[in-house]
Image: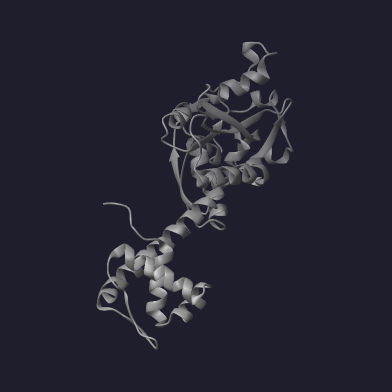
Amino acid sequence: MGLPRFTPRQLGAFVAVADVRSFAKAGERMSLSASAVSQLVSELETSIGFRLFDRTTRSVSVSPAGREFYSSAKSALAHLELAEAAAEDIRNRAAGIVRISAPLILASTVLPAAIKAYRECQPKVLVRIRDTAVENLLSTVKSAAVDFAIGSDQAVTEDVVRFDIVQSAWVLWFAPDSPMVEHREISWAELRQYPLVVAGRDYERTISLTQAEYVESEQITPIEIVDNISTAFGMAAEGLAFTIAPAYVGILGRRFGLVSRPIVNPEVMRQVCLYHSSNRALSPAAEGFREHLIRWFARSELLRG
């Protein structure tokens, strides 16, 4: 199918005249002179090869061919208006699909809250979350499975851009009826006295930052290592052990009825980062949501326990 031989402006002139049966009134609707409208209609008639109006000195009526053409012209203009509105939404980051990957804990707690806040101002933007194992986070970006990812700090290659969003302190989580509730904070050294259950192997790097000065027999040794933080929280909620995790898991921790206290001497921070491809530009919708996430994470109390 070839390109159309007429313009939207010509179609608009035809529809306007057909609606009001007057070149002068159609001109008022289009902010044009009657002669300019007549010229547009004449150009359209030449392009399509048939007369659209029967004209006399006193009246204008739609020709039989014009009546058949009217609905198609009206429909074409309506679709053009929809296309223009869609383009404006995309340009203004007001519409589109955004795909983001994150580890389970961020995907199930922090991200939904951030999406809810964004939906209030950009309801046409659909954000799809892909919960991903930490070790697979960067591969989802490299393979273009997602627009970007958020998660803990990782080394990146030249095809991935890393942006540090916010730091979240590691804290101690425990049941509210624990004697620990009387403490305002606890040191890493003091944690050796308490039963700890930890999630995953990530804690090893964190604890190693605080235990270098201690001999092996004096270092923190968890009584249990589980795969999922929700298991650790469940055990802590029943008073079976304490657990450590970054403060940003606070939404989930509070759902288990847990309370937290800062761990000090030293204070250890978890860096939350955003990752996207260095080879592909983000869509306007994805760029808009990326900027929202950066602002939202920076001011959110959810990351502070």
Residue drawn at (53%, 22%) of the image: 158
Report whether 105 appears left or right of 60: right
Q: Does residue 305 appear in the picture of this structure?
A: no
Q: How many marks?
A: 0
Which quadrant does the C terminus fall into? top right
Q: Position of residue 44 (x, y in %)?
A: 36, 66
Above or below, comparing residue 187 to residue 108 in the picture: above
Task: Point out residue 257 in the picture as x, y percentages from the top left corner.
Answer: 57, 47
Q: Quadrant of residue 58?
A: bottom left
* Horizontal side of residue 221 vs 49, given as left or right: right
Residue 93 on image: x %, y %: 53, 51
Q: Residue at x 29, y 64 (%)?
A: 48
Residue 111 visible at all: yes
Figure colour scheme: one colour
The residue at the point 35 percent across, 70 percent down is: 74
Q: Quadrant of residue 21?
A: bottom left
Q: Identify the residue at the far front of this view.
A: 57
Q: Quadrant of residue 142?
A: top left
Q: Position of residue 166 (x, y in %)?
A: 65, 36
Q: Is residue 47 left or right of residue 269?
A: left
Residue 88 lies, with reference to residue 131, above or below; the image says below
Looking at the image, the residue that sits furthest to the bottom is 58
Given residues 225 and 76, the one toward you in this image is: 76
